[in-house]
Amino acid sequence: TGTLNVAEMAPALFTANSDGKGAPAAYAVRVKADNSQSTEAVAQFDAAQNKFVPAPITLGAAEDQVILVLFGTGIRYYSSMNKVSAKIAGVDVPVDYAGPQGQYVGLDQVNIRIPRSLIVGGEVDLVLTVDGKPSNPVRVHVR
């Protein structure tokens, strides 16, 4: 016998270390001015710490767009897209997509555009909020 807490929604972001902390299970998509695209890792393995840590996301040229593609669960059943938001280092960032990943049943995806104003020198928290409920914070490094 026990108590069970049932919530309508509980957004959670997956992490590279599978512990809900640190670097996200994600990748970045760089879109250049000519619309060519490339993908980049946002986590790298640190042998000294024996875990994944955030890899720097370099925003590059002024005309480049960088989209962070995150994976998680408990995200897709939001009431409206207006109720999905994200903050990096406490700053609101645009969420372009939140919903089913499309290939794997039950996997949710969130696409976040990283604005140039977020060039920082170290690791910062990223928090997704869906219908007023925050996800676990993950760490990213934007430069």
Image (cartoon, rainbow, N blue to C red):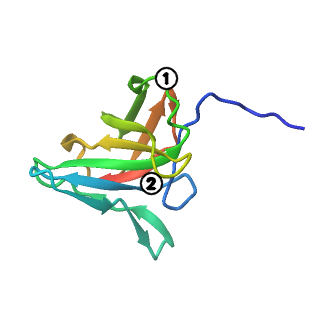
> Upstream in the sequence, badge 1 or badge 2?
2
Tell me the residue at 81%/34% (across/down): 3
Quadrant where the C terminus lies?
bottom left
In the depicted view, which residue is nearer to us: 18 or 39? 39
User: What number is the disc on residue 12?
Assistant: none
- Name the spot of residue 111 as percent of width and height, x first: 35, 43
Disc 1 residue type?
A: Ser
Q: Which residue is mark 1?
A: 79
Displayed quadrant of residue 26? bottom left
User: Which residue is at 29% across, 61% downward?
Assistant: 40
Q: Quadrant of residue 141?
A: bottom left
- Regarding residue 122, the answer to whether it shows in the image is no
For label 1, the crowd category at 10 Å Cα-Cα, with few meaning under 14, some 14 to 19 and many 20 or more, is few
> Is 138 left, or right, of 141 in this rendering?
right
Q: Residue at x 9, y 52 (%)?
A: 34
Q: In this view of the protein, which residue sits in the foreground, 93 or 40?
A: 40
**Would you place residue 11 above or below residue 61 in this image?**
above
The image shows residue 83, relative to residue 92, as above or below, that is: above
- Label 1 residue SS: loop
* Residue 93 horizontal/vertical position (percent): 31, 36
Would residue 106 appear left or right of 138 to someone viewing this image?
Answer: right
Residue furthest right in the image: 1
Camera-side residue: 48 or 7? 7
